[in-house]
Image (tube, rainbow, N blue to C red):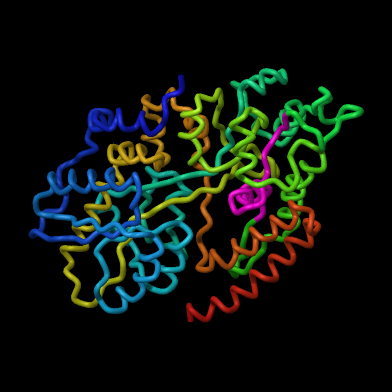
Amino acid sequence: MTVPLSRLALLTAAVALATFPGSASAQSYSGPKVNLTFLHGFTGPDRPVMEGLIKKYNESHPNVQVRGQAQPWGTTWQQLPALVASGKAPDVVVINEDQITGFVARGAVSPLAPAELKAAGINKSNFFGPLFATADYKDQAYGVPISSVAYVMFYNKDLMKKAGLDPSKPPKTREEFLKAAQACTVDKSGKKAGQAGFDPKNLDTWGVSLYNNWVGARAAYAAILQNGGQMVDKNQNAAFNSPQAVSAVQFLVDLVKQGVARPNSTEEAELAAFSQGKVCMFPSGQWYLDRFEQQKMNFGVTFLPRVGGTVKDAAWGGSSHLTLPRQASGYDANKRKAALDFMAWMSLPAQNLTWTSTGSLPTQAAVAKNSQFEKAAISGIFDRLNSVYATSGYPWVGQVMGPFDQAWEAAYLGKKTVPQALNDGVKESNKQIEQARKNFQ
C-alpha cells in the first residue's frame, strides 16, 4: 500500500533531527533579545504545523521570540503596501510566487544581499534552482522558499497494464505519451484509437484528461516552456503566441481531434472519470494525491512528459517564500539579523521535512533524497523537481496568466484556432500590461 505523503511526513517529522544531523544548529543570532512579527497565510490544516515550527524555534532561541499571525492571503495582498508605506510592516512575511515580483517592483520587499544570506547560513545552491529563483528580480534575491507545489501527472496503473504498457515506466517523451494515450483509449465496441471503426464519441476508457479551467491551462504553460517558448519577452510584454508556443499548444488541442481526450470537458468531470478508472493519465495539481490514496486507487505519479517539445523538462509550480518587507528608516538592525536567522532556521532540511506533512513538496534535494519518501507515490516526480517553474519574474503575472487561461479555453473548446486564440490572448494581455505599468512608475 502506498503511504500517504501527509501521514508519512507526520510520522517522520519526529525523527527529522536525526535524519538531518546538524540541521538544528545552535542559534546564530547573538544580539539582544528581540520580538518579531511573522505574517503568513497558512490558515487551513497547515496552520498547526506552522505554529508548531514557530514554537520550536522560540524554545530553542531564547533571545528571539516570533509571534505568528495567520490571515487569508488576499487580506495580506491588500494590506501589505499600506503597512509598508506607514512604517508598520511586519518583520517577516510569506508571499506566494504569483505576487512576489509585483511587491518587489513596488518597493514593498527588501532585497537579500549575498553577504546577509551567507552570514545567516542560507545557501541558495541547496534549493532547487528554479524554485529559489522564483523570488529573484533583476538578478537580486528577495525571498527564501519554504513551500512548494507542482503540476504532476497521475496515471492509472491498471489501465496501463490492460493496454500492454509497463506502469513502472510512465511516459517521458511526446512519442511515449501519445503511444500510451492511444493504447488506453478504447470505445465501447472495443476499438482502439487509430483503428478502423473507432468511435471517439462513444468511449469506454480514454488516454488523457484535458479541461478548460486555469489548472488545465497549466499543461499548456508547461508545454510552451518544454518547447523553448516563454510567457513574456525581454521587455516583459506577453509573448505566448510565439511559433514554439503555437506548436506546443496545438499538440494538446489535437489530442481531442485524435479522440484520446474528451472535448468540452471540465476538471470535475475528468477528476470523477479518473477516480472511476475511465481515464489513464490525469495531469493536474499534486493536491489530489490524498484523495486518490484515500480511494485506494492503484495509481502512480510522474512528472509531466515532454508533450510540448524536446528543449527541456518543465512543469508549472506554485510556491511560498519568506521575505523581509521594506522597513522605515531607523529600523532595528538587530531585528533584521534575527529575522534572517529565523528564515535560515525555517528553511533547514529538518523543518522542510516537517512542512511536507502539509502536502508541500521538498524545497531542496537533501529532503527529496530522504529515505522516508521511498514508498511515497509523489516521489515519482522527485527526479525532476529542479524543472518546476513558477509564474513569476515579472510584476504583472495576473495580466499575463488571465488572458492566457482564456486563450487556452478558447483553443481547447474549439471556439478559435490555436494561433487566433494565442494572438488574441497576447493582445489582451499587453493591453492590460500597458495599464499595469503605470503602477510601477
Q: Residue at x 15, y 53 (%)?
A: 29
- Residue in the picture at 27% in, 79% down: 86
The residue lying furthest to the right in this view is: 196
User: Is residue 157 shown above or below 396?
Assistant: above
Q: Is residue 120 left or right of residue 297?
A: left
Name the spot of residue 377 as percent of width and height, x first.
Answer: 48, 28
Q: Residue at x 63, y 48 (%)?
A: 216
Q: Is residue 212 magenta?
A: yes
Q: Quadrant of residue 35?
A: bottom left
User: How many numbered marks appear?
Assistant: 0
Which percent across, then down, holds residue 219? 63, 46
Image vertical order of residue 169 relative to residue 210, above or below:
above
In-front residue for pair 318/441: 318
Task: Tell me where the magenta segment starts and ends, as one range.
Answer: 205-229
Q: Is residue 173 left or right of residue 76?
A: right
Q: What percent of the width, then of the height, locates residue 291?
A: 49, 34
**Quadrant assignment, res 99:** bottom left
